[in-house]
Every structure is written in C-alpha cells, then in structure tokens.
Amino acid sequence: MCILKAKVVGMNFHKVETPVETGDYVILAAEDNEHDPDAVAVYNGDKEIIGYIANSDKTLSPNNRKNGNLDATELQKQIDFSNKEFYGEVDKAFSSCLFIKIDDGKWSYINKPGDDVPLEFVTANELAEIGTVESVTDISELKAEVESLKAIVADLHEIVLDLKLIAISRGK
C-alpha cells in the first residue's frame, strides 16, 4: 500500500452542484481523451467531474513536484487504472485546484460499456432518503459494521476468483 500525491486542475471549467472540500473523498478514473491520452479525470461523490490530474509543466510547478505531487502520466505508471477507479482524499482545497492523497489500495472495478451489469452509483444522501442509513451515535457500532463489511468483501473476492478460474478452465 502506497500513498501518492497529485494536484487536480481545471476546476473552473466544470460546474458542479456538490463542490469538494478538505477531507472529502474524490474518485479518479483514467480517461483517454483528445487533449491528453494519459488523462485522469477526478469526480466528486455525486459522480460530477470536477477536474483532471495535472499533466504538464504549466499545471504542475517545480515546487508542486518538490512536494511529491505526481503528474497524470507518472500516476498511471504507479497504479493500474485498467477497469478501476481509485479514491483520493482532498488534502488541501482551493477554488482553482485541489491537492489530493491517493491510497493505491483503495479502488473498485468500473463497468466498461457493454458490460452486462450497468454501473449504479448511489450517494450517501440517496441512501439516507430511502431509509437504509440510520443515525449511529456509537462509534463502536460503526467500527463493527465496517469489520463486517470487510469480511463480506473478502468473501465476495474469493467468489470472484473462483468464478474466474472456472471461466479459464472452460476456455472463456
């Protein structure tokens, strides 16, 4: 597990309903676009694009680099974005840019176009509205629930690996 640092730029070009602040989590996904084949798009929790990881000397200064910030090309060399989105935490938020920390161990799979199952993203607010999130006053309850969810994820991971082995053995 490694913590990487990056700078998010281009925020003035994207109007969002839910701006991010220091301490918020953001989602990073590789995006091959006409301006930058190594582009890494950054989204807020509502899946609104907020900007891109800096990827030029114009957007990432020598001082930014000195402070450990990677550009998008370097970031893609450090972590594999293939069918994955990574999560970063906003370390510093400014009106024109963000500085984020990315844990290379915090990611999830992305459904690519043509997958049988469409990607559905549900925000915490939507969960609260449909009554699946209850008010929790005891932090130990949250910790116990997190541990329970970790066990479920580990079990699901094992099932996925088993299914992949079956598919390979059948030649698919």
Image (spheres, helix red, strand yellow):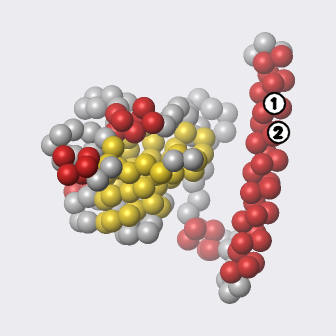
Most distant residue in the top direction: 171
Quarter of the view holding residue 75: top left
Q: Nearer the viewer, residue 56 or 108?
A: 56
Q: Is residue 51 visible?
A: no
59 vs 33: above or below: below
Residue 104: image location, x then y, percent:
53, 46
User: Residue type at mark 1?
Assistant: Leu
Q: Circle 2 is placed at which residue position?
A: 159
Q: Relative to 79, is 17 on the left or the right?
A: left
Quarter of the view holding residue 163: top right
**Quadrant in which the C terminus appears:** top right
Q: Residues within 10 Å of mark 2 (few under 14, many from 20)?
A: few
Q: Nearer the viewer, residue 141 or 33?
A: 141
User: What residue appears at the point 20 percent right and 51 percent down from the top-left corner?
Assistant: 63
Residue 120: image location, x then y, percent:
60, 50
Label 2 sits on a secondary structure element that is: helix
Residue 149: image location, x then y, percent:
75, 60
User: Residue type at mark 2?
Assistant: Ile
